Image (spheres, helix red, strand yellow):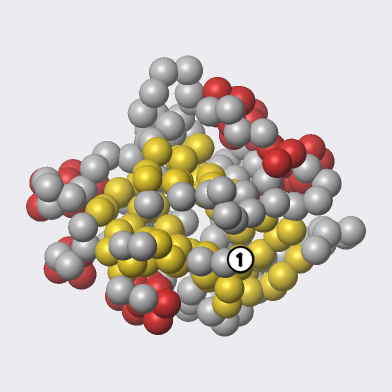
Amino acid sequence: MKITIVYDNEVKRGGLRAGWGFSAFIESQELPLVLFDTGADSPTLLRNMKELNIDPTSIETIVISHAHGDHTGGLFEILKINGSAQLFLPSSFRGALPGRKVTIVEDAMEICANIFSTGELEAIEQSLAIKTDKGIFVLTGCAHPAMKSILSAASKFGKVYGIAGGFHGFRDFKLFESLSQIYPCHCTQYKRQILDLFPDKASECGAGLVIQL
């Protein structure tokens, strides 16, 4: 199983575009192909997908972390291209999507085998808890809810060993001491501090980054 960062404020390989937003693609031989968030705009998202050899019509599940434009900007164009992907949206998401299989997420739930939603925390955002042989890997959109709440919700599915995504203004860094993989992405205000505090386990994020789980 692996996560490919499709959209981020930074880029990790040539040919990709950066933008203020976030999107990640989760793939495994055994699981449906999952797109987590859709960045801020469809041209950047679709260009990066093409460069990364990700076929938007192959996506089977789309999960939106929260309803802010930097995470939903590419959604409607993807839905025009892909007529079958099912959606998992937080209950705070507003907007009709007729003809779609839509699951409104309030509480923790299974998205598909080994991928779980933390549930919509603090009435704004859901994160993903991905079960691997190493433990639980957490994928966040912006981490608007308290990081302690996110990690606690994810830990209900197993011991958390890693995390990637936007961490917003998170600075209670001791919460990361037990983790072995940390990827501060997108809106993380204290990226440099995290990278400096955890040099052996924190790595820079960016579009094109591939995280092997």
In the picture shown, does residue 74 fall above or below 162?
above
Q: Quadrant of residue 134?
A: bottom left
Amino acid type at circle 1 is: Cys
Instruction: Return the residue nearer the eye: 80 or 41.
Output: 80
The image position of residue 3, as x and y in percent, is 45, 46
Instruction: Return the residue nearer the eye: 22 or 202.
Output: 202
Residue 174 appears left or right of 165: left
Residue 103 appears left or right of 195: right
Tally the marks. Answer: 1
* Residue named by callout 1: 112
User: Which residue is outermost to the top?
Assistant: 15
Q: Is residue 34 visible?
A: no
Q: Is residue 15 visible?
A: yes
User: Which residue is at 40% across, 81% downward?
Assistant: 156
User: Which residue is at 88% across, 59% downward?
Assistant: 98
Label 1: state its secondary structure: strand
Q: Quadrant of residue 8?
A: top left
In the picture shown, does residue 74 fall above or below 103?
above
In the picture shown, does residue 123 fall above or below 23?
below
User: Which residue is at 15% across, 65% downward?
Assistant: 177
The image position of residue 204, as x and y in percent, is 27, 39
Query: Circle 1: is it few (<14), some (14-19), or many (20+) Cα within 10 Å?
Result: some
User: Which residue is at 58% across, 73% downward?
Assistant: 110
The image position of residue 206, as x and y in percent, is 38, 36
Residue 1 appears left or right of 92: left
The image position of residue 105, as x and y in percent, is 63, 74
